[in-house]
Image (cartoon, rainbow, N blue to C red):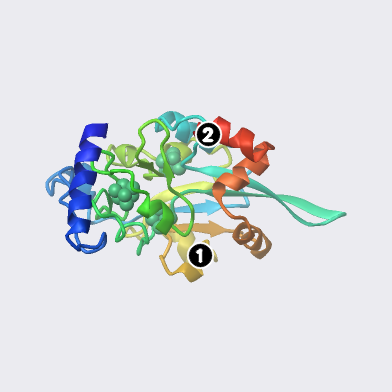
Amino acid sequence: MDKSKREFIKGGFATLVAAGTSANAFTLQNPGRDAKDSRYIGNKLKQYSMIIDLRQCIGCQACTSACMVENSVPNGQNRTFVTEMEIGEFPNVRKSFLPQLCNHCDDPACVPVCPTGATFKREDGIVVVDSEVCWGCGYCENACPYDKRFMNKETKVIDKCTFCAHRVDEGLLPACVETCVGGARIFGDLKDKNSEISKLLANFPTTVLKNEQGTKPQVFYIGLDGRVENLLNATVSLDDMMREVIGLKPKEWATQRGDK
Ligand code: SF4
Ligand code: SF4
Ligand code: SF4
């Protein structure tokens, strides 16, 4: 979104707030959402989800790289990342890998706080951001209990996993799913009872992250160890985890991310 457009919208927002209208009380029309355009509304006969089978993840970060290339994510930022953790105590220590991305929640905390309608849920369950409409206020970034949104340092608007909706609309798999060497990421339509994802959900116990947040995540994990969940909850943010994994000091990490 160009700067002048964002400033124009922000100006309009400021006027409305000054007139006593709260940020949540109105939604500017999203000109990018055309009810006839499946790229925006998706296919209402489908409900897309992902299962991540942690037994198959080897922590290679092939998904992380594939996502960055496919979606032109700037260096130092990520729509998905595989966190590496050590669990247990010496001598019984083992490595555990936890791939994370937007959970495409059924009741997403990020959607109702967006004052412009830039963040919305398609009819096929994919939660997206219209970068032409986002003004970069960051309300959604603060609202997401999973820390799965970030300000793209190049576009200056909010970015996150889209389940590669542009590929899905063409009948392709998300880039991270196609690239996963271990076959740990399974993507599909939960409304199709014969899909691989439906069968896996029906036959394996699965867990979602931070279930207590009540957002009904649609990324399910097989083999999630409770100790990993505890470690995850104890860590402040994905950024901090990445910094620790890469082994940078906070200042070096900020420089790599391009923070001012
Ligand atoms: S994980 Fe966060 S960004 Fe993704 S849909 Fe849920 S609340 Fe929104
Ligand atoms: S930053 Fe988030 S809440 Fe603000 S306009 Fe963009 S998508 Fe909506
Ligand atoms: S589904 Fe697409 S956007 Fe989401 S993490 Fe995978 S590659 Fe990235």
Helix, strand or loop at label 2? It is helix
Q: Is residue 138 left or right of residue 219?
A: left
Q: Is residue 209 above or below residue 166?
A: below
Secondary structure under tag 1 reads helix
Judge by depth and name the residue closer to the eye, 98 or 202: 98
**x, y (%) of residue 53?**
56, 52
Where residue 257 is drawn, which disc sits there?
2
Quarter of the displayed picture in which ligand 1 can be seen: bottom left
Q: Residue 112 carries which label?
A: none
Amino acid beneath label 2:
Arg
Residue at the disc numbered 1? 203
Give me the residue at 41% from left, 65% from top: 216
Residue sitting nearer the eye, 27 or 177: 27
Residue 98, given in percent of the width and then of the height, sits at 60, 50
Image position, residue 77 (x, y; %):
50, 36
Camera-nearest residue between 209 and 124: 209
Residues at marks 2 and 1, CA–CA distance in whole angstroms: 41 Å
Q: How crowded is mark 2: few (under 14 residues within 10 Å), some or many (20 or more)?
A: some
Report the residue at 43% width, 36% height from top: 175
Three-letter code for the amino acid on which mark 1 is drawn: Asn
Q: Are marks 2 and 1 in contact (CB under 8 Å)?
A: no
Whether residue 182 appears in this view of the structure is yes
